[in-house]
């Protein structure tokens, strides 16, 4: 399927279509084949479910809105309240955003979970047969208590849409991450702000290299995996800054750093010198890319140490270097294991 069609599919996936859709809104097999399926019967069972009370839009909220954007924005609010969720619910109901309504009812966002209503909206999301079946089964596990994790409309998405789903979630995470750091650094002096900005640019550069050169691009879930890799680095950076502000700066000695640095360099040299085994599962990852990423990481480590020396001069530079080196050692070890087929 051409990526050019993804935005249109995602709109149908999260929101609604203009014309009346079939119910269950499934494609890929004729209805007479599906009627004997358990998931199909479950969809029919809840077809006429209605909320106990109608969702009423708040004052001035009758215009166009982005239900998915509002949902993920609210998920990332540290103190989202009932009024915040009611705003999301009103938008989703008004735009018939079945994916968002499913998540609201299933996760009990601002309300008591209502699994039959969640199931009705799940069955209203345009989906291929396998995806619909998986989503219905997922909801049943959630309703029975066998699965206690919050459900996301993207959990059971077909491979074509997983990357789009992940990108949407990461945009919201990035907004939340940026807002947290902005609030944290309010009142810092210009030198401290500049130090953080330099470290932030360095970690973004390193994270992009991890995506471009240390993530296998041969998988159907590549885009989703790449975004997870990138988000992990950016999240960790934000956590490090916030931890240091909270009195939890890294505590490593110069000797500990030297030991970690020696181990990391040994693993890096081993990876670069050895030919990948026939059982290697590096996929599209190449040594030249890992070399570029290592250079980007070294620049990030230097920038983080500089930031630390400005904002937290009481913390030795070796502590910042050791903290980042320990993580990089783990990443390089995983790459070396992949090259060896371990």
Image (cartoon, rainbow, N blue to C red):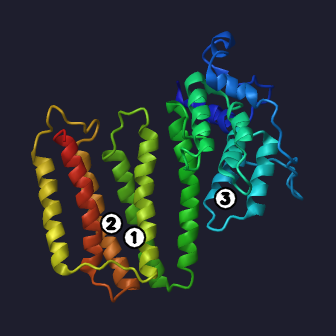
Q: Is residue 140 left or right of residue 64?
A: left
Q: Mark 3 or 1 closer to N-term?
A: 3
Q: Is residue 139 visible?
A: yes
Task: Please tell me which of labels 2 and 1 falls first in the chain.
Answer: 1
Residue under pointer 2? 300
**Residue 179: x %, y % from top left:** 58, 68
Q: Which mark is residue 209?
A: none
Q: CB of mark 2 within 8 Å of CB of mark 1?
A: yes
Q: Residue at x 42, y 44 (%)?
A: 225
Q: Label 2 vs label 1: CA separation?
A: 7 Å
297 with respect to 108 (left or right): left
On the question of residue 287 being in view, the answer is no
Could you tell me which secondary element the residue under label 2 belongs to?
A: helix
Give SS at disc 3: helix
Q: Which of 33 and 30 is in front in this view?
A: 33
What residue do we see at 78% from left, 56% from top? Answer: 87
x then y, percent, for residue 273: 10, 47
According to the image, label 3 marks what residue?
A: 74
**Mark 3 against mark 1, which lies toward the viewer?**
3
Residue 9: give x, y in percent of width and height: 63, 31
Q: Is residue 326 left or right of residue 113?
A: left
**Which residue is painted at 53% across and 52% down in the image?**
170
Occupied quadrant, residue 277: top left
Q: Which residue is under mark 1?
A: 199
Q: Is residue 17 above or below residue 236?
A: above
Q: Residue farthest to the bottom? A: 314
Name the secondary structure under disc 1: helix
Distance from the alpha carbon under mark 2 to that under mark 3: 31 Å
Mark 2, other Cα within 10 Å: few <14 / some 14–19 / many ≥20: many
Q: Is residue 197 above or below residue 9?
A: below
In this view of the protein, which residue sits in the foreground, 198 or 132? Answer: 132
Front: mark 2 or 3: 3
């Amino acid at each position: 399927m051409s990526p050019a069609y993804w935005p249109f599919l995602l709109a149908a996936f999260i929101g609604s279509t203009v014309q009346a859709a079939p119910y269950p809104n499934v494609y890929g097999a004729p209805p007479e084949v599906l009627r004997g399926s358990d998931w199909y019967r479950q969809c029919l069972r809840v077809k006429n479910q209605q909320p106990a009370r109608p969702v009423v839009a708040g004052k001035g909220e009758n215009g166009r809105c982005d239900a998915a954007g509002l949902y993920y924005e609210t998920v990332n609010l540290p103190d989202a309240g009932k009024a915040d969720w009611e705003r999301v619910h009103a938008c989703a109901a008004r735009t018939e955003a079945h994916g968002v309504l499913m998540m609201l009812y299933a996760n009990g966002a601002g309300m008591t979970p209502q699994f039959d209503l969640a199931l009705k909206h799940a069955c209203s999301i345009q989906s291929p047969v396998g995806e619909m079946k998986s989503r219905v089964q997922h909801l049943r596990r959630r309703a029975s208590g066998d699965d206690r994790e919050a459900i996301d409309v993207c959990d059971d998405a077909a491979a074509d849409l997983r990357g789009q789903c992940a990108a949407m979630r990461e945009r919201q995470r990035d907004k939340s991450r940026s807002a947290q750091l902005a609030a944290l650094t309010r009142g810092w002096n210009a030198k401290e702000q500049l130090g953080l900005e330099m470290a932030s640019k360095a970690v973004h550069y390193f994270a992009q290299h991890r995506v471009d050169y240390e993530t296998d691009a041969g998988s159907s879930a590549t885009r989703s995996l790449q975004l997870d890799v990138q988000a992990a680095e950016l999240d960790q950076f934000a956590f490090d800054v916030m931890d240091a502000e909270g009195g939890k700066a890294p505590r490593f000695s110069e000797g500990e750093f030297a030991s970690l640095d020696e181990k990391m360099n040994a693993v890096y040299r081993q990876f670069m010198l050895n030919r990948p085994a026939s059982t290697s599962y590096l996929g599209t990852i190449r040594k030249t890319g890992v070399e570029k990423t290592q250079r980007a990481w070294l620049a990030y480590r230097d920038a983080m140490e500089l930031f630390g020396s400005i904002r937290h001069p009481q913390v030795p530079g070796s502590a910042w270097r050791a903290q980042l080196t320990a993580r990089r050692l783990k990443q390089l070890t995983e790459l070396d294991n992949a090259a060896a087929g371990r």
